[in-house]
Amino acid sequence: MLKPILVSITLISFPSLAGAEPSIESTQAPMIESMGIRVGGYGFREPTGANGEEPTGTGWQACRMNGIGVFATKAIDKNFFIEGGLDTYFTDTFPIPESKRIYDTPLDRSSALLTIAAGVRFYTESLLSPFLQIGLGAELTHVSLPALALEETALLPMGFFGAGVTIRVGEKAKVGAVFRVNAMGYYDDAQFQTELAPELELATQGQFYASFAL
């Protein structure tokens, strides 16, 4: 029930807030210059098994999360920009299944992520413009382990570093992709526990997006 509510809030409430008219003279630059929508997924690093055997390697497949979000950007000058985003994520096995170990406990997780980032673009006049960004935010997450009758809702901090590329496809439209490394809360479902205790861990994330100038 929480998943559709989070997605609805993300897609409906954020554009209305971003589209509000600033109470300053119209001759000044707009508070928000472009808005977009993005999809992606992330996972935490965890040992992975082979054909039901003991773990034989490592991957970024623990607590696999997929999601959708909206974001807005504001240029500071030709190269520097800031970005604000609101995303919803939930546990999923597509397109990469979650890593499994013989003592794993099924975990369900739904999250809303509110983030802000500062970034720098390169070759801004070119068709392809790479960029770097660094940001922080907060995650409102709901986690449940039905097999252990455990459930928790928490507000957790997060931070990230990202690198991506933007491609111009029209006068106002752009598409692109970004790869991020997130530092965020991780619930280790590979251990039998009497309570849910998040730990700060790294997660790798990939996103694809489209944006339009206002």
Image: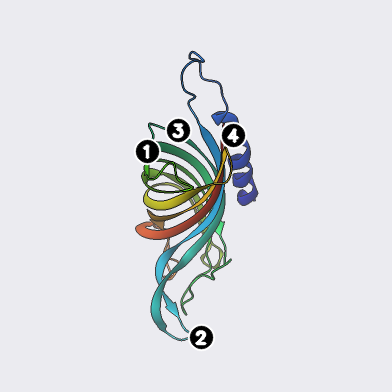
What residue is at 53 percent from the left and 56 percent from the top? 40
Q: Determine whether 12 is above or below 147 in the image.
A: above
- Mark closer to the chain start, 1 or 2: 2
State the image coordinates of residue 49 (x, y, percent, origin top left): 45, 80
For label 4, the crowd category at 10 Å Cα-Cα, with few meaning under 14, some 14 to 19 and many 20 or more, is some
Please give the label number shown on residue 4: none
Q: Which one is in front, 89 or 163? A: 163
Work out how far the residue at label 1 is from the one at label 2, CA to CA, in angstroms: 49 Å
- Mark closer to the chain start, 2 or 3: 2
Work out how far the residue at label 2 is from the one at label 3, CA to CA, in angstroms: 48 Å
- Mark closer to the chain start, 3 or 1: 3
Q: Which residue is tagged 2?
A: 51
Relative horizontal placement of residue 69, taking residue 185 as reference (left or right): right
Q: Which residue is tagged 3?
A: 74
What residue is at 59 percent from the left and 45 percent from the top? 6
Work out how far the residue at label 4 is from the one at label 3, CA to CA, in angstroms: 15 Å
Q: Amino acid at mark 3?
A: Lys
